[in-house]
Amino acid sequence: MVTAHVDLSTRLGKLQLSAPTLMGSGCYGSGEEYASLVDLARIGGVVLKSVTRHPRLGNDAPRLWPVASGLLNAIGLQNPGIESYLENDVAKFADRPCAVVGSVAGFSVDDYAYVTERLAARDEIDAIELNISCPNVAHEGETFACDPELAERATRAARGVTDKTLIVKLSPNVTDIAAIATVVEAAGADALAVINTVRGMSIDVDRAAPRLGNVTGGLSGAAIRPIAVLAVWEVARAVRIPIVGQGGIETARDALEFILAGASAVSVGTGNFTDPRAPLNVSDGIRAYLAERGVSALADIVGKANPGFLGGR
């Protein structure tokens, strides 16, 4: 039996998405860059590039290097800083026909609170992604996402200054991602983005030197998908809040792995660089998969392959 209508909507806290597809931070601009190629009304939303309290020039070049089944990046959070961002950029997001999620990065707990409050106050911003994969300058470079106490403090600080949906992005570069997820949930996160990039590097054997100007970078793309699916599986067994699965999603079947593992939505990042229509193909493929099985709603298959799924939908 094939259903006449399939409901692809999903909810992340207060944020209602008409489709389960978000576009990864730093991989889709503000949406307008893809508007001539993709009907933005057919995607769930765009996660904007991370913004910090103060302007950042980013890392030395080269910042990108393609590797087998993936991409290494070391952009270094280049951005104009929150004040310039609010003055010159945010107003144009008002005309987007999809959700707009602001991304906040910081190097201290106070940074996270300050930037979240300033950005979330704008009507153009529907939700906040908290990028806690940054080094804390007051803790000898300890990354927020890799330390339960720092993750908890950053999340609680952001939670205290906005009622909008707060999506905390977790790092895979930890021993127990589920433990970090549990702490972040208790601190007030409405949803979790699982995962961020995996640390890696590439060496030019002819020059006998690292290829990236920053030496190391974050690996994204298909190469990290099995790592990301496992992380979603583990986190979905530890928390009840919704999960955005991300890491190497290029096709609908890729996305379905995450959804069946326990993700209520998915984010497409590096896949957009090779196929700008990837998010539409993902949504259409998910719809066809559900229709072929007589399933009327996306929510009915979230976590279906995960016996320990706690039910964050």
Image: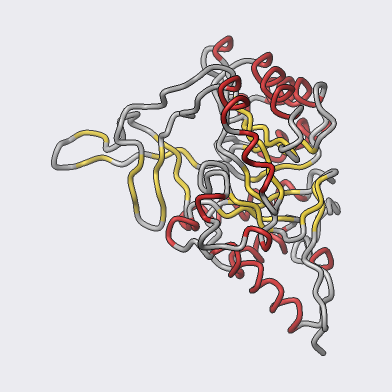
Question: Which residue is at 76% across, 50% downward?
Answer: 236
As drawn, is 272 to the left or to the right of 48? Answer: left
Identify the residue at the far bottom of this view: 1
Question: Which residue is at 35% across, 36% downward?
Answer: 63
Q: Nearer the viewer, residue 125 or 246?
A: 125
Q: Quadrant of residue 49?
A: top right
Q: Nearer the viewer, residue 64 or 143?
A: 64
As drawn, is 121 to the left or to the right of 31? Answer: right
Q: Is residue 225 above or below residue 106?
A: below
> Which quadrant, please, contains the N terminus?
bottom right
Identify the residue at the far left of this view: 206
Q: Is residue 213 above or below residue 94?
A: above
Identify the residue at the far top of this view: 138
Q: Position of residue 240 (x, y in %)?
A: 84, 46
Question: Which residue is at 33% across, 45% downward?
Answer: 65
Q: Position of residue 99 (x, y in %)?
A: 71, 48
Q: Position of residue 79 (x, y in %)?
A: 49, 28
> Which quadrant, please, contains the C terminus?
bottom right
Q: Position of residue 264 (x, y in %)?
A: 76, 56
Q: Quadrant of residue 306?
A: bottom right
Question: Which residue is at 84% across, 67% downward?
Answer: 300
How many numbered discs, if any? Answer: 0
As drawn, is 92 to the left or to the right of 298? Answer: left
Q: Quadrant of residue 268?
A: bottom right
Q: Is residue 167 above or below residue 260?
A: above
